[in-house]
Amino acid sequence: MAGLPYLLKKILVLLLFVALQSAAIILLVNNSYFQQNAVLNVVRKWQVKCWDKRSSWIAFTNLRITNDELSRENVALKAELARLSALEHIWRAEKEGNLSASDTFSFIPALVIKNSVNQRHNHLIINKGQADGIRPDMGVIGSHGIVGIISYVTEHYSMVISLLNIQQRFTAEHKKSGTFGTLRWNGNHYKRIHLSEIPQHTEVSTGDTVVSSPFSLLFPDGIPLGTVRSSSLKQGTSLELEIELFQDFKTLRYVQVVSGSREEELRIITEKEQEAL
């Protein structure tokens, strides 16, 4: 070894040391139950860590599939909720002797591929269009409330006017009192919106829930939208409620487009109403 380079000598010595050390450990483990058990415990711990890392990686790589499955389950649950809500309206109408046809809804799942929250006129783009049964003026909801309304449709994509748009107006209801008003965004905080035209005698408390209204033509009623943060008297005649939204538009990924069974009839009658004004 005298003629070998210094670095190679070091490597050979290290390899010899590792070989001798490995042989010593093998002999020690094979001839001692206590040492064997200790080594196996260390090996098991490393195996568990490796399995845990592998499981986490598999879960991460399957996250898209899992989200799609959850989205489909969410759509099914919302459809069932809408059906039960319609049945409840019919039951109440029959009980009061004033039966009227109740609209029913179905839901088309979609993925948000573009979104904005920092402008005064925010829009979203989703990956479903005419080929999927999407039409303008359909409502769009997320897992935690109203998202907006379809404004423009192509074969495979649709543009949505966001709830976070100062030109949008929706009808919503103070759940505890059953009083409805106009829901609108003032262009400031993306998690806060205002419900106006609430009669001043209405008993409102911080934390009260606001839901979608049964008078809405685009959405099932009773969808939770947010909670009351504060209230103020406007022009001495009505209350304006500041609402903390449940839906976080910055993390919005999956939505459902709401399709009403009598949507076209409602659109026609609404246009006639506007012409009469």
Image: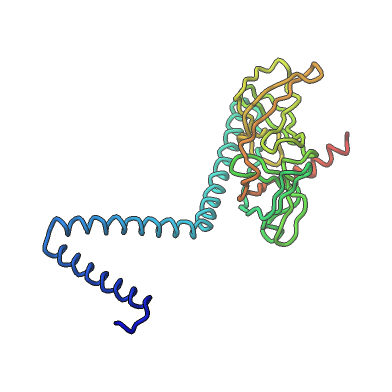
Q: Quadrant of residue 14?
A: bottom left
Q: Is residue 245 above or below residue 258?
A: above
Q: Position of residue 96 (x, y in %)?
A: 62, 25
Q: Nearer the viewer, residue 7 or 69?
A: 7
Q: Quadrant of residue 52?
A: bottom left
Q: Is residue 273 left or right of residue 89?
A: right
How was this image coloured? rainbow
Residue that extends furthest to the bottom in the rendered view of this protein = 3
Q: Nearer the viewer, residue 10 or 193?
A: 10
Q: Residue at x 67, y 30 (%)?
A: 243
Q: Position of residue 148 (x, y in %)?
A: 71, 44
Q: Position of residue 42 (x, y in %)?
A: 26, 56
Q: Is residue 173 above or below residue 108?
A: above
Q: Is residue 88 left or right of residue 121?
A: left
Q: Residue at x 22, y 70 (%)?
A: 20
**The C terminus, quarter of image:** top right
**The N terminus, quarter of image:** bottom left
Q: Quadrant of residue 226?
A: top right
Exactly how many numbered labels are in the figure? Answer: 0
Q: Nearer the viewer, residue 95 or 209?
A: 209
Q: Position of residue 253 (x, y in %)?
A: 61, 50
Q: Residue at x 62, y 52 (%)?
A: 108
